[in-house]
Image: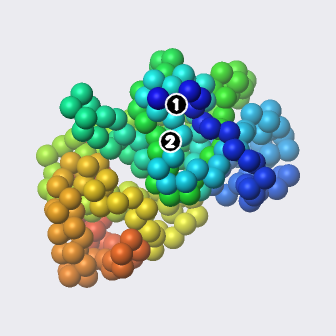
Amino acid sequence: MSNTAFPRVDRSVLADDGDELNFCSTCAFSQACLSQGMDKSSLQDLHMLVEHIGPLHAGEHVFRVGDPFEAIAAVRAGTVKTYVIDRDGREHVLGFHFPGEVIGLDAIDGDTYPCNAVALDTVMLCRFSFPKISVLAARLPGLQQHLFRLLSRSIGRAALLAGDFSADERMAAFLIGMSDRLAARGFSPNRFALTMPRTDIANYLRLAPETVSRVLKRFQEDGLLQVERRELELVGRERLEALAAPVLRH
C-alpha cells in the first residue's frame, strides 16, 4: 500500500490547454461551471483547488485500496484502470477512465479508497481536494449537481454489464460506450486506440480473453470495424449500435 495517494511530481512538465478565460478542453467540471454562466475568471475558487499531477507512466498507481481518501481526480490525458483483488488473489476490473472523467468518487462514503487505480499509459490528472470542493459545491448548486451526476454515471456503468448478455452484445456495448465517452470530450467517435490490453477488456466484460479476440476478429470480418493492433475504426456503427442496444437499455 502506498503511503500517500496521488503522488506529487514536477508540474513543469504539464501544459494547460486552456487559458485565463477558458477551461481545459477535457475539464471534468467545465460543463457544470459553464451551465451556471461562469467562466474560469469568475470561478477562481475552483481553479485554485486544482493540483496538476503527472505524468504517471503505465503501471504507476494513482491510489491503492486503503489509502486515505483526501481527493478526487479528473483525468486530463491517458487512461486509468480501476480494479480490486479478491481474497483468492484474482483481479476484477471495475472500469476504464478517459480524459474528462473522474476517479475516486466511490470513496466519498468512506475514509479510504475502496479500489486501486493504475495508469495504463502516460496519464496526467487534475487533483481536487474533496473537503474543499465540498465546501465550494455547497455555494454553487450547479457544481453540486454535477458531482451527483458524475457519481450516478459511475454507478450506472458499474451495473451496465450485470445482465445476461451475449459476448457480441457486451463487446458492442463496450465499443459504443467508449466511442460516446470520447466523443463527448471532443475526440473522434469512430477512430481511437484501445489503450487497455485485451485481457483487461475480457476481465471487465466478464469474458474469456480468447472470446474477446474472437469477437473482434468476427466484427472485422463482418465489416463492423477495422483493427490494426490497438488502433480501431468503427465502420459499421449502426449495426454495432443495434447489437449494443439490449445492454445500453438495461
Q: Quadrant of the C terminus?
A: top left
In the image, residue 75 sits, relative to residue 147, either above or below, namely: below
Q: In the image, residue 55 lies at what x, y percent?
A: 63, 52
Which mark is first along the chain, 2 or 1?
A: 1
Residue at x 31% of width, y 53% of height: 200
Q: In the image, residue 178 lies at what x, y percent?
A: 41, 59
Inspect the image, locate mark 1, and give the three-letter code of the amino acid beneath it.
Ser
Asked if marks 1 and 2 touch (Cβ < 8 Å), the reply is yes
Whether residue 74 can be seen here: yes
Residue denoted by label 1: 2
Q: In the image, residue 20 lies at what x, y percent?
A: 85, 52
Q: Is residue 16 left or right of residue 194?
A: right
Residue denoted by label 2: 61
Q: 222 or 68: nearer the eye?
A: 68
Instruction: Using a 10 Å C-alpha cutoff, classify the residue at mark 2 as few (fewer than 14 neighbours), some (14 to 19) or many (20 or more).
Output: many
Residue at x 51% of width, y 35% of height: 63
Residue at x 70% of width, y 24% of height: 132
Q: Element type at marker 1?
A: loop
